[in-house]
Amino acid sequence: MQPEEASKEINRWVSKATNGLIASILPEGSVHPGIAMVLANAIYFKGKWFHPFDKEDTKKKRFYCLDGSRVRVPFMCSGKWQFVVEHDGFKLLKLTYRMQSDDDTSSPDRMYRSRWDDYDVDECHYEKSNNERLTNPDERPRLSMCVFLPDDRKGLPSLGDKMSSSTSFLQDHLPTRRLPVTKFRLPKFKFSLSSKMNDVLRDMGLRAAFDEHKADLSDMLEDDGGMFVENVFHEAVIEVNEEGTEAAASTVCTTVKKCAAPTPVDFMIDHSLRDCSFR
């Protein structure tokens, strides 16, 4: 398969796996004759809220950005009790999704569903000490979206530091019961990110994999053939609205072999030039 054809095939696979949310992840020229291996993954999720928002209640309100600017965005509102908890410096909200037993037509969609079904949380019926199954929907384990809100409008960076300080941070701070809320607004939004991750990964400490003299992929391959990572591309999309959440992400890693064939170069002398002779 030619490089251009391979690139198109990978992009088609990612688009199908993400239900079209990520139409293309590999930029032109990223797959060339020197590429030895391409690793790609993709994930897709679509879930409906257990308690959906009323579209009639969605109103535009002021949103404060980190740089101090203000914009008007649509906010979803609700008067229902919410899974929310207050901690030192921040609040945490948990919004739950409907599962298959709630409504057979509205369970979260996942790629390779038959594979997921082996581990579906909806199938894991936790039992009480008297062997009575938990029947309250709020008590059953289910998929949720968590929203961290710093008390300070510019407190997101410091909250991020707190979150990364412990691998159990989320579990340690999750709300356990619903509380009445006097004012409740959640912005309706759609975010997307597309990035070449090489520098980010290096800053996180993953340097050897990109170095042709230090890379060692032998734990992945019996014979890595002297391969090292050339590029890592990542793209993610998430949309949150009154009905629920739709999200997708994909990462593609390209590797080359040491002393790989050079990338072809175009050299068309069709404009003014300068030449010289030398010995």
Image (tube, helix red, strand yellow):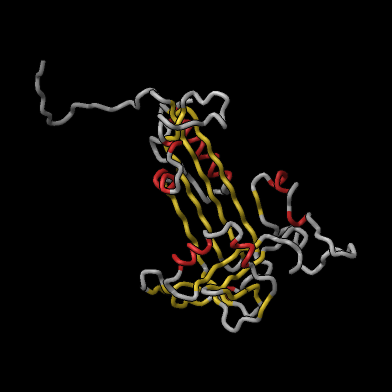
Nearest to the observer: residue 3 or residue 123? 123
- Residue visible at 38% across and 23% down? 259
Using the image as rendered, state which of residue 162 and residue 1 is in the foreground. 162
The residue lying toward the viewer, choosing from 257 and 37, is 257
Q: Residue 69 location, x and y as percent?
A: 36, 73
- Residue 143's place in the image compared with 275, above or below, is below
Instruction: Determine whether, in the image, residue 54 is placed left or right of residue 132.
Output: left
Residue drawn at (41%, 43%), measured in percent from left and top?
198
Identify whether 17 is placed above or below 80. Answer: above
Position of the C terminus, as image quadrant, is top left
Task: From the viewer's perspective, tell me whether residue 119 is left or right of residue 159.
Answer: right
Within the image, what quadrant is residue 26 found in? Answer: top left
Quarter of the image where one finds residue 142: bottom right
* Location of residue 134 in the rendering, given as x and y in whole percent from the top left corner: 82, 65
Q: Residue at x 60, y 70 (%)?
A: 93
Residue 50: name its quadrant. Answer: bottom right
Q: How many badges with numbers are in the image?
A: 0
* Residue 120: % across, % down: 73, 52
Q: Is residue 59 above or below residue 267?
A: below
Residue sitting at the far bottom: 182
Left or right of 232 on screen, residue 98: right
Q: Residue furthest front?
A: 165
Q: Nearer the viewer, residue 192 or 173?
A: 173
Query: Outermost residue toward the top?
Result: 279
Q: Residue at x 73, y 55 (%)?
A: 121
Residue 2 image point, x, y percent: 45, 26
The residue furthest right is 130
